Amino acid sequence: MNELTFRTATAADIPALIELVTSAYRGDASRVGWTTEADLLDGQRVDADGILADINRARSVVLLAEQDGQLMACCHVADENGHGYFGMFAVNPKAQGGGVGKQVMQYAERFAAEQWQLPTMQMTVIDCRDELIAFYERRGYVRTGIKKPFPYGDARYGLPKRDDLQFEVLEKPLGAAA
């Protein structure tokens, strides 16, 4: 297996990004991997306008991880209020569990620390996603106890199947270990 190569996404990558993120989180295709949200949400996970806004925003990048010319994973990294933000993290369901996600996270953390000198990386995770939160905790993230409401009624974030969804902020210090 060849190493992952990383690059910054452009507008031309948006269709492939939508396909990758959707395959990792929504619908029956996402059930191949372990990151599926299919039991929690229907509908879209990302849209073209949102991805383009992330690509064009200052101190914000969408990173692509490729292997042999194939898109394997992506994430959004941004400077948000002096903290790194890690989001839109998706790994091809067929490649999950093989170390791709760990490599992407490490690259994103180094990027935020080296490019923007940010002290921490934060993310939001639906708080009932215990297995996913445990994955992040094994990589040095801690639960902050800060909760944020799920945007019910905003179809850009999906169509909830439950009425108790909320986000929790996870955080990791960056630096030499990142």
Image (cartoon, rainbow, N blue to C red):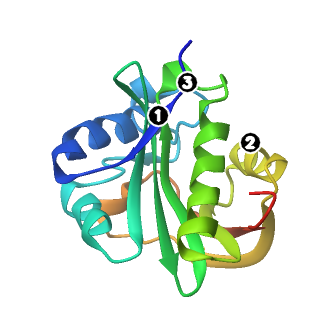
User: Which residue is denoted by mark 3 in the rendering?
Assistant: 3
The amino acid type of the residue labelled 2 equals Glu
Alpha carbons under labels 2 and 1: distance apart: 27 Å
Q: Is residue 32 left or right of residue 29?
A: right
Q: Name the disc covering residue 5, or none.
A: 1
Q: In this view of the protein, which residue sits in the foreground, 106 or 23? A: 106
Task: Please give the label number shown on residue 166.
Answer: none
Crowding at dot 2, Cα within 10 Å, few <14 / some 14-19 / many 20+, comes out as: few
Q: Amino acid at mark 1?
A: Thr
In front: 38, or 131? 131
- Residue extending furthest toward the top: 1
- Closer to viewer: mark 2 or mark 1: 1
Q: Is residue 56 above or below residue 128?
A: below
Between label 2 and label 3, give the one nearer the viewer: 3
Above or below 68: residue 133: below
**Residue occupying image coordinates x 51% and y 18%:** 94
What residue did someone put label 2 on?
A: 131
Looking at the picture, how far across and down is residue 86, in whole percent? Answer: 55, 61
